[in-house]
Image: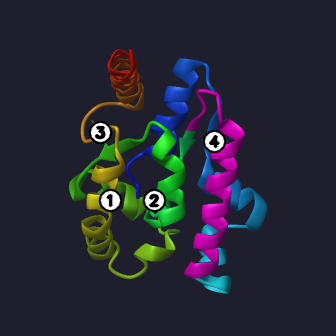
Amino acid sequence: MAVGKSAIGQQLAQQLGAPFVDTDAVIVAGHGSIAEIFAGRGERVFRDIESRTVAAAIEAAEGTATVISLGGGAVLDSGTQQLIRDCTVVYLECDADTVAARIARNSGRPLLAGDAMGRWTEMFATRRPVYERLADITLDVRHGSIPELGGRLEAALRSYAAAKQEVEQ
């Protein structure tokens, strides 16, 4: 949450000439703001919408080099974990210092209501092991501009793909 998934994902897609899908943006376009969904229908309904949106995005992207940005909590769903096993998963690694200013600027995150940094720290402690377990590639996003991070990620993806191809031969 607040690590730059959308910005870095868009940058990477542009560099690769690939389509980009931000599942949070798809949810907002089809269902209204995430904050409104949480307030009016609850987190459980949001997570159901999110898991269906992720599944549709992955299905639509099958066989392509589409870059898909998932919301920070999407990978907590076991069905989503199953779906992304066949995808190259990137974990954008950060820390509280990295996201503090971003979180302060964006008060529309329903799970961070109240003590935003305290809530972020709690959620990150729960989510981090899942991110690490699912990741094929980990990119440290604490330093660098979006274009620099996109370049580093593209290089990491190319290395990963080459190593994977070597193993498969």
Element class at badge 2: helix
Residue 55 placement: quadrant? bottom right
Which mark's residue is nearer the viewer, 4 or 2?
2
Q: Is residue 71 visible?
A: no
Q: Residues within 10 Å of mark 2 (few under 14, many from 20)?
A: many
The answer to whether the residues at label 1 and label 4 have Cβ atoms under 8 Å apart is no
Element class at badge 1: helix
Q: Amino acid at mark 3?
A: Thr
Instruction: Name the residue rendered at 77%, 61% in the picture.
Output: 30
Q: Is residue 25 visible?
A: yes
Disc 2 to disc 1, C-alpha distance: 7 Å
Name the residue carrying label 3. Answer: 138
The answer to whether the residues at label 1 and label 3 have Cβ atoms under 8 Å apart is no
Q: Residues within 10 Å of mark 3 (few under 14, many from 20)?
A: some
Any magenta on residue 60?
yes
**Residue 32: x and y, percent?**
73, 67
Q: Which mark is residue 71?
A: none
Name the residue carrying label 4. Answer: 21
Q: Amino acid at mark 1?
A: Val
Disc 3 to disc 4, C-alpha distance: 20 Å
The answer to whether the residues at label 4 and label 2 have Cβ atoms under 8 Å apart is no
Quadrant the C terminus occupies: top left
Pick the front one: 54 or 82: 82
Q: Which mark is residue 130?
A: 1
Instruction: Name the residue rendered at 24%, 59% in the picture.
Output: 96
Q: Amino acid at mark 2?
A: Val
